[in-house]
Amino acid sequence: MSSNPGVTENGFPNIFRLTNRDDRKGPSLAHYLIATMGKKRAIVIDDQTQYGKGLADAFSNGFQAAGGVIVARQAVKVGDTQFGELVKGFSDDFDVVFFGGIGEGALILKEMRDEGVTQLFTCGDGCWDVKGFIIPSQGAAAKGEGVRILSAAPALGTVPGSAEFAATYTAKYGPINNYAASSYDSARVLFAAIEAAAKAKQRMPTRAEIVAALKAIRFQGIAYAKPVMWNEKGDNTGAVIFVNVVEGDHFKEIDQIGQ
């Protein structure tokens, strides 16, 4: 699930990424905001982690390439909880905030709405979490222009088999976490490669034979409508990025981008 581009850029033959890369997520969201929503001027904030800064960099580059302007680039620290000074320092001349990070996003959004800042708030799938984003935002996600939050997989029930998976998972383990479907597919595609290699060799396959079978596999999972297939770097060509709003206590998928 790691989204840093470097994971599959280093030439390791045994690394495979089921979900999307930050250098697809960031620019895709940037283009979506400009082309679909008419946004032109962004404030970009990151949490200074490799994930948050990397995604914010990718978004900023994509936003500018698509004709947008980065009004300000700011940073917070993981664990910060007070964002009054940050929000009060915002320029008036912007129409969207992008946050690259995880836990601080909800609190930045809440502070924005408390201060009467109504512009759209956007984030990558680091904010795609009910407990980590919707609950601590305390209703702020539905105020002003609302939010656009990326997710790494579509709503359960969209792809055939995913509703049945959700029912079985919930009955046994309780509420589903955000990456359950992708984790399930990651395990199953590996099992399928082991089985294919064993069948081809008519014996217990070696590690190298399993890797070869995985490289060649075409596997229909439940996280994406298109089958899992890998490009030469090990990235899944069937991965799609999904756009969500918040309705009450849940995310609602409204669009998909980046395919």
Image: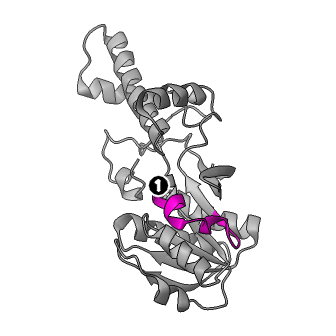
Q: Which residue is mark 1?
A: 131
Which residue is the extreme one toward the top?
A: 202
Q: Quadrant of residue 157?
A: top right
Counting from the top left corner in percent of width and height, residue 139 is at 60, 65
- Relative to 80, 207 lies left or right: left
Which residue is the extreme one toward the front?
A: 138
On screen, residue 176 above or below 76: above
Q: Which residues are magenta?
A: 131-147
Examine the rendering and report whether any part of residue 143 can be seen: yes
Amino acid at circle 1: Lys
- Whether residue 28 is in magenta: the answer is no
Residue at 48% x, 31% y is 170
Disc 1 secondary structure class: helix
Which residue is nearer to you in this view: 256 or 213? 256
Residue at 53% x, 48% y is 152
Which residue is nearer to you in this view: 99 or 69? 99
